[in-house]
Amino acid sequence: MTLTRDQVVDLLSLIVAHDGRNPSESDLEAWSEQAALGRWTWPEARDAVITHFHHTSEWIMPSHVAVIIRGRRQDKASRRMAEHRTMLNQPASDTRVREIVDQVSASLGWVPKHGPVLSVPCPHCHAAPGYPCTRSGRTGKPDIAVAAHPSRRDKADQESQR
């Protein structure tokens, strides 16, 4: 949300405290127009004015504030992009894929079809937790006839009774 007229008055008051200017109604209009054009928020504009006077005693203009705000927004966007790239560059290990699937499932309110049975490894086919049982001694493809081997169900029951 862009600055309100009262916030622009407050911003000019902050500027007056630093440089002693005597703002007019036309100054208020000019600063309001620039704030609207740049879609400045109060925290951004206030911090930009403080930053400007921290580095220089030069008479501040709306363009100075705009440059500081634009730079900070670009820095923030660059950091977000770098974080996003880092996340995308993580290897797609089975564990990482399972984490992502679990996060998406939880956000959609999905409940695992096989409940706690898949939370333990299968002693029969050695399927990892979270993965369906596979055909032993064959291709390692999921066993569509059995959601979980009986020994896995037993192990899950034992774990849940602890």
Image (cartoon, rainbow, N blue to C red):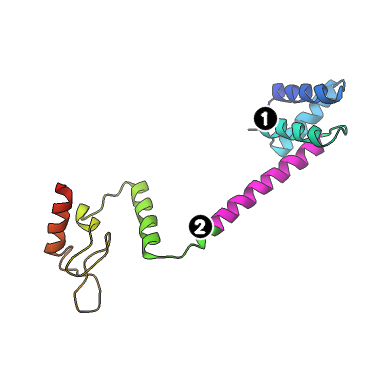
> Is 75 left or right of 27, judged from the image as shown?
left
Q: Amino acid at mark 2?
A: Met
Q: Residues within 10 Å of mark 1 (few under 14, many from 20)?
A: some
| Residue 85 quadrant | bottom right
Is residue 41 at all visible to an observer of this figure?
no
137 in the magenta segment: no
Q: Residue at x 24, y 64 (%)?
A: 132
Q: Amino acid at mark 1?
A: Trp
Q: Is residue 93 above or below residue 109?
A: below
Circle 1: element type: helix
Cβ atoms under marks 1 and 2 closer than 8 Å: no
Tell me the tag on residue 87.
Answer: 2
Q: Position of residue 69 (x, y in %)?
A: 72, 40
Tell me the tag on residue 96.
Answer: none
What is the magenta range? 62-85
Quarter of the image for the N terminus: give it.
top right
Q: Which residue is mark 1?
A: 42
Is residue 41 or residue 162 the one in the foreground? 162
Q: Residues within 10 Å of mark 2 (few under 14, many from 20)?
A: few
Q: Position of residue 39 (x, y in %)?
A: 69, 37
Is residue 6 or residue 152 the one in the foreground? 152
Q: Position of residue 5 (x, y in %)?
A: 71, 23
Q: How many marks?
A: 2
Residue with the most extreme front position = 162
Circle 2: element type: helix
